[in-house]
């Protein structure tokens, strides 16, 4: 049985979109489910679009996401090098093989000549296509004498090597997600495979590398489906049909409204990241937000992405990476596009955050405190996290939900004041202070007991005391249980806050 070998092959033309992370994830899950190998290959044949730092960003993004590789540009392996710009000599020999067997040819038409042709066709309301219907009237090795072709090559004239698409043939692609896809060859053009600058195009390099690296399955985005018939042809032209990988083209990641592919512009407009990590454009300096910096956990991010196009066929939604590996199958990947859902992304992160222990949550909150120059012991931070663990959606929410444990309120919520602060409230709180001062030890249970006795003695409802008490400590009506908060913060900080509230809060 053939060994399962899959690859993720991004181009270093900018930050990695979350759709690319999902493609990498599905490849990873498929490889691990089938005991196979997962390879990272960098496809940088288009040097004009190369962006400095993009390759490192790709590796860092996938590492943060928890997607690991068996071979790759950052690891090496038996089929190195894994960066296409380092494999130029390999592609040249395979381009020559196609020339020699008559399935490719030299084309000497200049870009200006081709642009002029396209304009002529546009005037006739037609579309120019370099292919079976037009190539016999153009400047290429199919129409020029051998002597002239050789002379042009010797003189270093501009040329490209084009594939020779067959005329009037139905090309069939077997897709694991979409079934059989048939394309009439008349719809295809003679794509450029190799350029005179010594660089192959994506099509040649992709097929050659997949063959040489023994790739068994090509799992990639739907946008590459139109290229699949050409790739099937190239396998035939090279005589590699028996070694051809199986194809699976994943559905698009769609905007939240389902109308079109999810883009950075959508994220900017609707306020969510479309990149795994923050990205700073090296040319413009523009900064784009990332899931990591926005406060998402990698395990929540991965779980969310897994469900954008795949489902396990059960009601279960929370999956560890091992559970995803165990349950994943290409057969359960949808043909139709998957709509991004920000609320669901938040839900996933909340689920994972709330399951973290206080000690784990403290490791997220402590750096925020350090940034704000707040010095407290780890044990105290863990006590705080134990009280707020169900309240945070994103990591920054840990501060939002706990700031009053570390700093006293600078102002008081006017709406809350108007509802709960009465003329007698300052006196009531002033009488409550000695009760708090007398409590030893200052535990939740003792605070609760003494407070109930005080309220009963006063003949009032618990809310009449607790609501203004909370307001003086927090600044609003938010937060965990008041007895829990008081016990953690401590009487030495609680009582000064009450006194300050009495002095500053006015009806």
Image: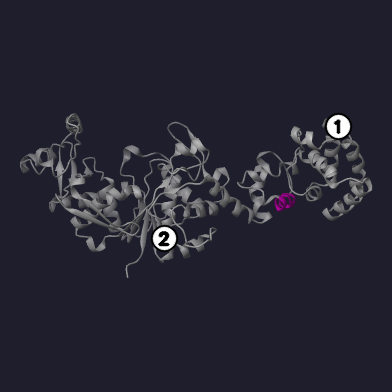
Q: Is residue 87 visible?
A: no
Give coordinates of residue 495: x percent, y percent. Answer: 86, 41
Q: Is residue 103 left or right of residue 9?
A: left
Q: Give the crowd class for mark 2: few <14, some 14-19, many >=20 residues within 10 Å.
A: some
| Left or right, residue 383 beside residue 426 | left
Q: Which residues are magenta?
A: 378-387
Q: Which residue is mark 2?
A: 332
The image's mark for residue 429 is: none
The image shows residue 68 at horizontal and vertical percentages of 46, 57
Height in image: 297 above or below 272? below
**Residue at image point 67% right, 42% down:** 400
Q: Nearer the viewer, mark 2 or mark 1?
A: 2
Classified by dominant secondary structure, the portion drawn in magenta counts as helix
Is 40 located above or below residue 158 in the figure?
below
Residue beneath label 1, please? 503
Q: Nearer the viewer, residue 299 or 146?
A: 299
Mark-to-mark CA distance, 2 and 1: 64 Å
Residue 153 at x, y percent in the picture: 13, 40
Residue 494 in the image: state x and y as whole percent: 83, 43
Q: Is residue 175 left or right of residue 363?
A: left
Dot 2 or dot 1, earlier in sequence: 2
Identified at 19% across, 49% down, the residue is 185
**Depth check: 157 or 310 in front?**
310
The crowding category of the residue bearing disc 1, from other C-alpha atoms within 10 Å (few below 14, some 14 to 19, many at least 20), is few
Q: Secondary structure at mark 2?
A: helix
Q: Quadrant of residue 177?
A: bottom left
Of residues 116 and 7, which is closer to you in this image? Answer: 116
The quarter of the picture where the N terminus appears is: bottom left
- Residue shown at the point (33%, 56%) measured from the top left: 178
Residue at disc 1, secondary structure: helix
Residue 329: which quarter of the image?
A: bottom left
- From the viewer's side, name the closer residue of 60 and 394: 394
């Amino acid at each position: 049985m053939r060994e399962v070998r899959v690859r993720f092959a991004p181009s270093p033309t900018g930050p990695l979109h979350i759709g690319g992370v999902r493609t990498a994830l599905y490849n990873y899950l498929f490889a691990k489910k089938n005991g196979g190998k997962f390879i990272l290959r960098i496809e940088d044949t288009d040097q004009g679009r190369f962006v400095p730092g993009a390759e490192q960003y790709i590796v860092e993004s996938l590492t943060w996401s928890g997607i690991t590789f068996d071979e790759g540009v950052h690891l090496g392996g038996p089929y190195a090098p894994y960066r296409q710009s380092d494999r130029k000599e390999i592609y040249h020999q395979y381009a020559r093989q196609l020339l020699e067997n008559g399935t490719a040819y030299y084309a000497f038409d200049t870009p200006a000549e081709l642009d002029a042709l396209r304009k002529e066709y546009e005037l006739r309301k037609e579309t120019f296509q370099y292919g079976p219907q037009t190539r016999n009237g153009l400047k290429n090795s199919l129409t020029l004498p051998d002597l002239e072709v050789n002379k042009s090559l010797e003189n270093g004239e501009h040329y490209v090597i084009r594939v020779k698409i067959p005329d009037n043939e139905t090309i069939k692609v077997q897709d694991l997600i979409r079934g059989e896809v048939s394309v009439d060859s008349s719809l295809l053009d003679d794509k450029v495979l190799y350029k005179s600058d010594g660089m192959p195009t994506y099509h040649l390099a992709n097929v050659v590398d997949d063959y040489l690296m023994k790739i068994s399955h090509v799992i990639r985005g739907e946008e590459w489906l139109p290229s699949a018939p050409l790739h099937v042809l190239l396998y035939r032209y090279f005589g590699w049909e028996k070694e051809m990988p199986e194809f699976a083209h994943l559905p698009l990641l769609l905007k939240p409204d389902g109308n079109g592919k999810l883009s950075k512009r959508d994220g900017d407009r609707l306020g969510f990241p479309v990149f795994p990590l923050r990205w700073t454009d090296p040319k413009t300096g523009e900064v784009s937000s990332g899931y990591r910096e926005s406060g998402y956990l990698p395990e929540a991010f991965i779980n969310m992405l897994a469900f954008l196009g795949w489902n396990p066929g059960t009601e279960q939604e929370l999956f560890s990476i091992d559970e995803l590996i165990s349950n994943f199958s290409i057969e359960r990947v949808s043909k139709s596009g998957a709509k991004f859902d920000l609320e669901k992304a938040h839900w996933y992160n909340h689920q994972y955050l709330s399951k973290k222990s206080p000690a784990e949550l403290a490791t997220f909150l402590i750096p925020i405190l350090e940034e704000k120059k707040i010095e407290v012991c780890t044990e105290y931070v863990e006590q705080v996290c134990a009280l707020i663990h169900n309240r945070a959606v994103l990591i920054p929410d840990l501060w939002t939900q706990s700031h009053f444990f570390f700093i006293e309120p600078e102002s008081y919520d006017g709406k809350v004041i108007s509802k709960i602060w009465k003329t007698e409230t300052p006196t009531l709180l002033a009488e409550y202070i000695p009760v708090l001062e007398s409590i030893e030890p200052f535990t939740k249970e003792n605070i609760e007991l003494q407070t109930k006795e005080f309220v009963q003695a006063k003949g009032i409802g618990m809310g009449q005391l607790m609501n203004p008490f909370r307001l003086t400590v927090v600044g609003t009506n938010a937060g965990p249980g008041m007895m829990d908060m008081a016990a953690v913060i401590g009487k030495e900080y609680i009582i000064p806050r009450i006194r300050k509230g009495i002095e500053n809060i006015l009806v």
